[in-house]
Image (tube, rainbow, N blue to C red):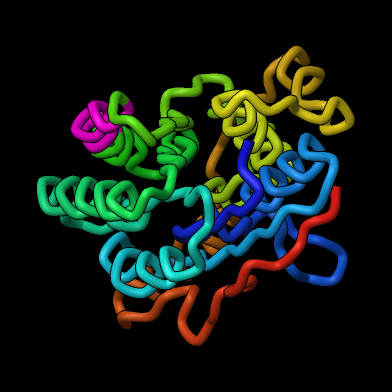
């Protein structure tokens, strides 16, 4: 049972897609912190340093040491999703950087929650290309799961999570249902009960959603702006800072 938790990563970990009424985002990592506090029956402390749009290199360079300096009992680590969406992905370099980061956390005596990201590729243009990259990267890293002090949560190969019901309108980010399912996967992996009011089991038992179709409106609203940012070297995370840069209490 962990009483201090820090999360690093990109939009997946920041919580994009699980928007709250005030415009902020929640996401699976926040839900995991809530689940830990509920199981502990007392406050725990939690930080989230993830920033949307970050490739693996900046996650490691900007967030890893900052998270370690907080001295939490556990750090969740995910990255590489934005690397996979680029025209070229240096797979070996990405895998080695990921591997080095996991060992760096372990060397500090901090438990590693190593996550693969959820797989949106059944709904995206060129999805088969990105799916193959993600499968290869996951396969290159799965041996880390056997190390002491590492818990691997394989969302990429959670087939049910690919259902369109778990995805936002952009089909790239999880919605609130998807984030709840990932949080459920994480809590289950570390032996913490999943709050029944999240309704994860009920959603999973319901019929699957309709087959996804990419309309001209979808390309105008989501794909073309994404391409525009790539061509101009911009990122959705430009100018953003961590939403929770220090360990702060989370009530049960």
At 85% from the left and 71% from the top, the residue drawn is 22
At 25% from the left and 47% from the top, the residue drawn is 103
At 53% from the left and 57% from the top, the residue drawn is 72
**In the picture, which quadrant includes the N terminus?**
top right
Q: How many marks?
A: 0
Residue found at the far bottom of this picture = 239
Task: Point out residue 41 in the picture as x, y percentages from the top left corner.
Answer: 84, 40
Task: Point out residue 17 in the picture as x, y percentages from the top left corner.
Answer: 66, 54
Decide whether residue 96 is among the magenta residues: no
Q: Is residue 238 left or right of residue 2?
A: left
**What is the quadrant of residue 201 in the picture?**
top right
Task: Point out residue 185 in the picture as x, y percentages from the top left corner.
Answer: 59, 28
Q: Nearer the viewer, residue 195 or 161?
A: 195
Give the residues in magenta.
Answer: 135-145
Decide whether residue 144 is among the magenta residues: yes
Q: Is residue 22 left or right of residue 35?
A: right
Q: Is residue 63 left or right of residue 7?
A: left
Residue found at the far front of this picture = 109
Relative vertical location of residue 164 with respect to residue 8 in this rendering, above or below: above
Q: Main secondary structure of the magenta part?
A: helix
**What is the quadrant of residue 228 in the picture?**
bottom left
Task: Point out residue 45 in the picture as x, y percentages from the top left corner.
Answer: 69, 59
Q: Nearer the viewer, residue 146 or 211?
A: 146
**What is the quadrant of residue 82 in the picture?**
bottom left
Q: Nearer the viewer, residue 97 or 176?
A: 97
């Amino acid at each position: 049972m962990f009483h201090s938790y820090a999360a690093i990563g990109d939009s997946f970990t920041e919580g994009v897609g699980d928007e709250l009424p005030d415009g902020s985002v929640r996401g699976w990592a926040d839900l995991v912190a809530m689940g830990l506090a509920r199981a502990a029956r007392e406050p725990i402390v939690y930080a989230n340093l993830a920033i949307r749009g970050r490739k693996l290199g900046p996650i490691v360079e900007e967030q890893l040491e900052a998270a370690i300096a907080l001295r939490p009992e556990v750090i969740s680590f995910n990255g590489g999703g934005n690397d996979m969406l680029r025209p070229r992905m240096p797979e070996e370099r990405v895998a080695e950087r990921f591997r080095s980061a996991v060992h760096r956390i372990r060397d500090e005596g901090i438990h590693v929650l190593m996550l693969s990201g959820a797989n949106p590729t059944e709904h995206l243009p060129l999805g088969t290309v990105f799916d193959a990259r993600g499968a290869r990267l996951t396969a290159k890293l799965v041996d880390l799961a056997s190390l002491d002090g590492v818990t691997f949560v394989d969302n990429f190969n959670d087939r049910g999570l690919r259902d369109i019901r778990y995805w936002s309108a952009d089909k790239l980010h999880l919605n609130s249902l998807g984030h709840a399912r990932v949080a459920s996967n994480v809590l289950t992996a570390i032996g913490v009960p999943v709050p029944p009011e999240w309704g994860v089991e009920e959603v999973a038992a319901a019929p699957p959603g309709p087959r996804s179709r990419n309309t001209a409106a979808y390309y105008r609203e989501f794909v073309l702006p994404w391409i525009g940012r790539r061509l101009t070297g911009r990122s959705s995370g430009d100018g953003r800072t961590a939403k929770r840069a220090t360990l702060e209490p989370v009530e049960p």
